[in-house]
Amino acid sequence: MTNYLSNNVDACISLLESMEYTQITYRQQKNELRFSREEGLNPTAMRLKLDTLKFDGFSINLHGNLFSLVMQTQKLSFPKALHYIANQLGLEKSQFSGKIRYPFSGFYKGLMKEINEPEYAMKTYDESEIDEYLGKYNTMFFKDGINFQTQEFFKVGFDLESCRITVPEYTLDGKLCGVMGRLNDTKCSKDERWLPIIPCSRSLTLYGYHHNYDFIQQKNIVVVGESEKFVQQLHSMGSRIGLATCGCDISDVQTKYLKSLMTKKIVLAYDKGLEEDNVRMQAEKLVLNNAVFKNRVGYIYDKNNLILPKGSKASPSDLGKDAFLELMKNHIVWLE
């Protein structure tokens, strides 16, 4: 869908009009649209860059991209915003298979892939598959910094049959694709902790993507941890800029989607104990540097063990909000 909308003046104008934005003008030289919320207001107060689909609302201090603008204007979740756009423009899957104009002289061609392409295809399930697990919150996660409101938000539950805490996994567009189960026992071995209840390939998705997409676009930063717990702990801290790769090796698919967010900053917040060279290697995958867009990529590294205990496997989010903020403020190594 991004490929379809990028540099598509008519489609973007039609979409803005459907949300009752007005005074829409196309500035060809800058390849952007300017518009306002209603007649009589500053007609240049809002801007949509057609190549990147980045959005800026100068008068209301609101920023993001076209998708987050739809989410905010129509009060929709990320998956429902995608459906809204498709419905408003009369789009079907078959219409994405034709020749597409890519921005940046083909920069997006290798970066952006449609979710329904074969390499991204994942088996999905109806939400009713997890109904039996819901409403059963747990104190293990609570003691680990994940409050009950967060557990409800991410649909954390409990499977009575296997005695496991359930964590649903979702595709990038918000469809249920699996369920992981955490044994409800703090003393179990590492090999026993996590098992799939409904298996899925987590390397083809990013945990928290459809939950936090709008906030990541608004803040223009994404912080990437290893586990689902990382995203949930940040949510309990009041932060909605976290995603998880569900492992310490960022897959090609995950790399493309992290880059496609086009945030100014990407920060890796991997667990203590990984060699710095390994973390740096993962961070280097996420660098964008071309004539049109350049991001800043870094990683949390507590070299002198000032926050994260030496020899531990602690996540940067494990020690609470103050510790996490300190790591973000003073312990990021930025790639040059």
Image: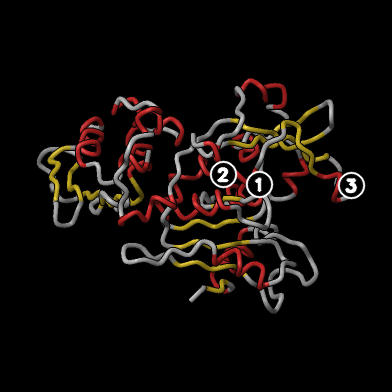
Sort mark 1 into few (<14), some (14-19) or many (20+) by Cα contacts within 10 Å.
many
What's under tag 2, amino acid-wise?
Answer: Gly
* Residue 262 lies in quadrant: bottom left
Q: Which residue is mark 3?
A: 188
Image quadrant of residue 69? Answer: top left
- Answer above or below: position of 174 versus 104: above
Return the residue at label 1: 228
Q: Cα distance, mark 2 to mark 3?
A: 27 Å
Colouring scheme, one of rainbow, by chain, secondary structure, one colour:
secondary structure
Name the residue at 14% across, 52% down.
28
Residue 130, image x, y percentages: 67, 25
- Could you tell me the amino acid type at mark 1? Glu
Instruction: Name the side, left or right, on which 25 lies relative to 311.
Output: left
Which residue is found at the position 65% from the left and 38% from the top?
151
Q: Are marks 2 and 1 in contact (CB under 8 Å)?
A: yes
Q: Which label is found at residue 208?
A: 2
Q: Is residue 95 left or right of residue 126?
A: left
